[in-house]
Image (cartoon, coloured by chain):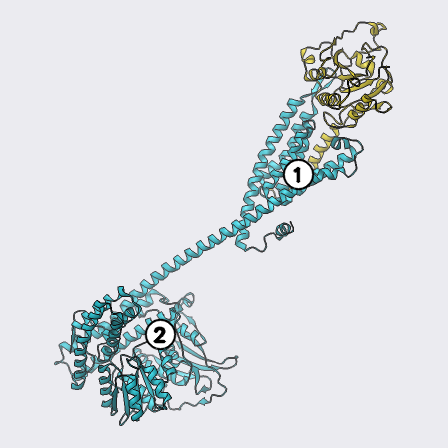
Chain colours: A cyan, B yellow
Amino acid sequence: MKALIEFAQSKFTDLSPSVQLKLADQFKSIHIRTDRMFAVLMLLQWVGGIAMALIVSPHTWIGAKSELHPHVAMAVFGGFVLASMPIALAIFHPGRTTTRMVIACSQVMFSSLLIHLSGGRIETHFHIFGSLAFLAAYRDVRVLAPATLIVAVDHLIRGVWWPESVFGIATASEWRWLEHAAWVVFEDIFLLIVILQSQREMVDLAQHTDRLEQGELQLKRAITAAEHANRTKSKFLANMSHEIRTPLNGILGFTEVLMRDRLSISDDESDEYLHTIRRSGQHLLALINDVLDISKIEADQLQVENIAYSPHQIISETISVLRVAATEKGIGLDYRWESTIPSTIETDPYRLKQLLLNLVGNAIKFTDQGSVVVVARIESAAENPELVVEVRDTGIGIAQEKLDAIFQPFVQADDTVTRKYGGTGLGLAISKRIAEALGGSLTAQSIVGQGSTFIVRVATGDLTSVGDYAPAVHLPGGDIRQQITPSCDLNGLSVLVVDDGDTNRKLIRLLLERNGAKVRQAENGQVAIDMAIQTSFDVILMDMQMPVLDGYSATSRLRDAGFQGPIIALTAHAMKGDREKCERAGCTGYLSKPIDADELYQAICIAITDGKCTAETPSSSAAVPQITGEPIRSLLPTSDAEIREIVSEFLDTFDSKSVAMQQAWESGDLEALAQLAHWLKGAAGTVGFGCFTNPAAELELNARDGEVANISAPLQEIKELKQRLVL
Amino acid sequence: MFHNPTGTTWMIASCLWGVAAVGVWSWTTCYEFKTDAPSATLASLERWPSDSELVLAGDRPTLVFFVHPRCPCTRASVRQLERTLTGAGLSNGAQPKLIVVATVPEDADRAWRATDVITRSARLPFAEVHWDTSGKESSRFGATTSGTLMLFQPDGALCFAGGVTSSRGHEGDNQGSRNLLVALRQEQSLAISHQPVFGCKLCTEFDFATCNNNCALMPSDGEHSTEGANR
């Protein structure tokens, strides 16, 4: 009972607002409905009272003369008084507390009237108990109070002045009215329990309904979001299609020109075409990297490293890379520091540079007149110091209401932006995620027509023990790479190339020997260890996935054996975590397959000079998609006899491996198939057939995962591509 | 009045209605207990009127029940008397001779004589109905209100006078019926008990003042009925 009373007193305040609203609506509906039922009942009682008076006592007699009995007048007028107000309230003021209180009072007083009209018949007294039960239909315990009180007061008054009328004796105890009232309270207790139980059930139902509605709402939102995402992705694919086709057209078009008119074009023209092809390839690569980045970010797989790196170098390299683009557009591009420059900060230089390249590249893209200025400063007032980089442009600007949207994936400020300026709409989304991953933020301020400022904040780590960097005064605009990079000389460098792929080994050997290095080869980790024990190498290039002993184990054992020199990991995996895994094994550098000659030279150069130099090298050998049906040639300079031989050997090997691949597929040997695909993924790219990299990677993944249904497509693609290979 | 009244208006109207409802309750309740003062004759009556044409029983008490045949409130008196005489376990010796004196006007038709009050009264034990035209007998006893009962001992002494309902037309245990029962049982010596009577005015148009001395000697134009006397 105590719990019930507490429940009644709580007034449902511990419920959620939406549940309270539902309950309020439900109670309102119940109160109005019950008001109306009582209004009808009042009318019936009024008519019934009149009928009773007319039937039972139509006349009173004074001798032989009759008059209308006062009971009839009481039924008509008294009944009218009692019924009129409740009916009026039920019609014009339904659902209110006042209405049901008046109804409760009226109903009990009607009992009194009807009892009187019926001559005090005991049966009519049950009208009171019936009325109380009916009042419980309101599910409001308060309505029982006035009804009960009226009964008690009626009996109290009668007990004092007319005790016989209720107690049958003239000398009843003055407290006997309490006994009568107690019986009414007795019924009230049961009604109270029923009302509170009913209220509890209503609460349960409202909560259940609320949960269902919330679920339905969330489902609708999810459907809307999914539909929106679907539309956005469709739009993104359309943009991507455009973005991919543009550089592809450049690559294929100029390649076609070079193939067809090779003899008639000059060397300058040829160089220009090749540069265009290279730029297009790089653009395509950047595009694909963007897509991969956003995919990783969306899969929460964005990982950043935290190493000490010069912020000045990051910014100046960024400016250097994009200076050409700015110059081509005829706008200025410069940067400056507005604080002292720490020599290093703890961050991920690769990601920070990627972020700045995106922002500055965007700024250049959307600025037709004026300039783009990068302003950097260290804010160390807060608990954690931050590097703040502002990219200010005088471009077209962004409308205020679009400022939030531009950071969402696949969204650009305006569709017209896509049409006019291109882009996938991924750059800013990636940049924002990177800034957050680097412990900071990316925000934007803009005025349409006047320009935009993108503000990057990234954590720098503790700077208390970091010295300041003093940039050379004469540095123009900041291309420090061009200024400080010495040429990298591999002459006499002793290099051990460890790779189970014969083609890879040969090609790397060739590239290194061309630059003066002395190269020895090992086909697995165990052979490499044996050789390293006997011979001292300046650098070891270590493939990480090999038979007998893989690169991770080999590197660990070499380190355990006391090998101090640099070990550069070669891996066909492109995931971020691989780098850390290699470093944990003891590698000092990292190169992903297919091997880019530029990156190879740079990695070795950095390794042997302890990170103090970079190398400038010939063009890279980016993988380039091919036009369907066209012959596929190696991107390596096969005019070189040695390279031609390597490519030729690859093609021969590929023939046998291809047969083995088909046999493995037909026999269901997925492990063998995965190994062959892994070989193809690394070897083909290395010899300039990058078009095999993706299908081979897909094949390997599906074979390892046992996704049999998804194997035939990449296998078929590899077959088709292979048929088009020419030396 | 109901053109968009405010909550306060409804509250005031409800309060006024409450006053009116209390007025209704007071009206009905006061009417319920309203009685006429007993006549001077009844107040001073102590013995069987010598001029009465009714016959006093010699072997048992005589209960005289004055009724208005068409009085609705008297139904309750009849039922209550029925309960007293039949439901209280009176011995045969204690059962009184019951004379139902039904007062009717001179021009009373069947509607006056065939009423449920008369029918039910006539069924009471040892009952006989005496049609009291113009209320001559009633006037002799001083009865003015329907439902009045008078109990006389065989020696003519009055030991009870009044009604057996607690209020107008209201059945139920009450002091009047209890006193009547005590008097019937002769369990204790009682002074004459006068109880309030709730009912219509009897047809007592007979005026003794204008009647000559022969009135009492004149044969009654009423008639005795033995209807129900033997139950």
Q: Position of residue A404 (x, y in %)?
A: 42, 67
Tag 2 and tag 1, C-beta contact below 8 Å:
no
| Image point (16%, 80%), residue name | A648
Do circles 2 and 1 both sit on a common chain?
A: yes
Residue B8 visible at all? no
Q: Chain of mark 1?
A: A
Dividing the picture into quadrants, the one containing residue A452 is bottom left
| Of residues A652 and A625, the one drawn nearer to the viewer in this rendering | A652
Q: Position of residue A673 (x, y in %)?
A: 24, 71
Dividing the picture into quadrants, the one containing residue B174 is top right
Answer left or right for A578 relative to A382.
left
Please identify the residue farthest to the left as the structure is shown: A263
Answer left or right for A659 relative to A605.
left
Q: Secondary structure at mark 2?
A: helix
| Of residues A249 and B200, the one drawn nearer to the viewer in this rendering | B200
Which label sits on residue A105? 1
Compared with residue B35, is residue A471 higher up or lower down, i.e. above or below? Answer: below
Of badges 2 and 1, nearer the viewer stands 1
Q: Which residue is mark 2?
A: A362
Compared with residue B209, is residue A375 higher up or lower down, i.e. above or below? Answer: below
Q: Residues within 10 Å of mark 1 (few under 14, many from 20)?
A: many
Q: Secondary structure at mark 1?
A: helix
Residue A725 visible at all? yes
Looking at the rendered image, the quarter that the C terminus of chain A falls into is bottom left
| Image point (22%, 79%), residue name | A688
Q: Chain of mark 2?
A: A
Residue type at mark 2: give it.
Answer: Asn
Q: Earlier in the sequence, mark 2 or mark 1?
A: 1
